[in-house]
Image (cartoon, coloured by chain):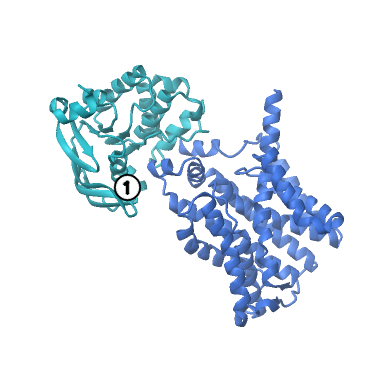
Chain colours: A cyan, B blue
Amino acid sequence: MLRLTNVSAGYGQIQVVRDVSLDVGEQEIVCLIGSNGAGKTTLLRAISGIAPFCVGTIEFNGEDLSDLPGHEIVTRGIAHVPEGRRLFRTMSIRDNLLMGAFRRRSASEIKHNLDRVYHLFPRLAERRDQAAGTLSGGEQQMCAIGRGLMSEPKLILIDELSLGLAPQVVDNLAKTLLHIRDLGISILLVEQDVEIAFELASRGFLLDSGQITVVGTTAELAENPQIKLAYIGA
Amino acid sequence: MLASLAASFPARPLPRIGVGVLIAVALGLLIALPLGLDNYYMRLATTVLMYCVLAWSWNFIGGFVGYPSFGIAAFFGFGAYAGAILLSAKIIPFWLSPILAAAGCFAVAVVIGMPILRLRGHYFAVASLGLGEVFRELAMSWTALTGGGMGINLPPMRPAFGTEAQTFYYAMLILALVTLGTTIVVARSRLGVAFRCIRQNEEAANMIGIDATRSKIIAFAFSAALPGAAGAIYASWVGYIDPSDVFDILNSVKAPVMVLLGGTGTIFGPAIGALIYLVFEEFVTHHLLQFHAGMLGIIIVALVLFMPHGLLETLRRRKQGQA
């Protein structure tokens, strides 16, 4: 459903990602791994239209997204859960979630999506009136994912799911991601923790200094000597 | 549901009962006010209305969106000159001058906003500050159109009814009500929600589908058009304008100070700030004329140190603390 062909992206004069081709299928979790500064975040930003420059083609369900501005990408069915959550800190959880539905008009649909998020993350329902800035890291991540779901996406880009979170919290979030996939939503997951990434995803891409160097199913990647050496430490 | 979200934002909802009565009484007082005032107080009343317009205008870009603009003087002056030039050419009646000035400022702000709203924080502040200086230089050197440093004398106005002072008071009152109305409508609309999202986190705002650039340009244009109209009325009111008067950088500083005094991003904060500021300004010009600018500096410092959220918010927090 998502297909990137020879995408290069970066900031002004600095090209961070070069000639990347990548695809995500229907109802699939795909992971993008790589070290710090490899260009993972830039690539996600290129997909959601907020990288300062981006060349190549980004196709989503047959439509070319390359020239669309960021605020239009959301309406095509791609939600971005950014690194560091980026919540509206003084707003309540409920308002943060509702903001995710900014481009949706139907009140009944918004209500339905809100209930869906509360169902996936009962914790958010319990604290719906609490300001987002006062939540724990895990709850903030739930809120950010929930906000993404409110736009009724077909694909969610998640940047650093586990960043700064306790292993138990990450396990819970990971389970929820599987539920989300079962709802028919694909996920492109950027993740430092390769173990979590491989557990969740069916396929993976290794981004190294801005280029894709290894592609395969996660089972294959787990056996790849280069990845084993650099990321698993075995 | 988004509508309810928008409604849940504007400052503190007032209790429903009595609001209608309160508005009617306030309006009645404002309309009847000129009957009981001498010239000095008429001038003060008109000035406070003008300050309200400037403060509410600044609130769009500086308060709701959180982009600290120092561009009020630029558009106030632009509007003053637009009005003065058109009126002294005797091609339009007085009442049309603020409308045309506002339209002109709106258009100019859209064009200028596109490049400078790409800047954030203090970079934007500096760019907007420069704007007033550029306009002032233009007015200084484009002698054929503006009269340069000699300024422009406006033709005297013969009001259809009442005195001149009353006419300008009512003109400023109407403009202030328009500005307040715009503020309330924007605060409760999707646009207002977008403004607040941008203030909290511009990148996240983009990610949820808000066209941040467009929203910022609209806010900037509002905070240019309304001071432009005020400038046009001001020009007729004082009868003579020159570049150093209408492009006075102090206007760019006064507006945010008034808003900070009252409360940023609230609906009535700016008006309260404008009133406090005017009383203070009168006091200082009567008793400490030489130290006028110095006192302004002292208030700014005191504000930042003691009431960074404005008077309304400080009072509310104090009350909450006691409860």
Q: Quadrant of the C terminus of chain B?
A: top right
Q: For mark 1, what is the residue?
A: A49
User: Measured along the vertical axis of the image, is residue B88 above or below residue A73?
Assistant: below
Side (left or right) of B21 relative to A77: right
Q: Residue furthest top?
A: A168
Looking at the rendered structure, the kind of residue marked 1 is Gly
User: Measured along the vertical axis of the image, is residue A189 above or below residue B74?
Assistant: above
Side (left or right) of A50 relative to A178: right
Residue A121: x %, y % from top left: 38, 22
- Front-most of A88 and A98? A88
Residue B296: x %, y % from top left: 74, 52
Side (left or right) of A181 relative to B85: left
Q: Identify the residue at horizontal 71%, vertical 24% (top origin).
A: B322
Q: Does residue A116 show up?
A: yes
User: Measured along the vertical axis of the image, is residue B95 above or below residue A20?
Assistant: below
Q: What element carries label 1?
A: loop
Q: Identify the residue at horizontal 51%, vertical 28% (top origin).
A: A131
User: Measured along the vertical axis of the image, is residue B283 above or below residue B80?
Assistant: above
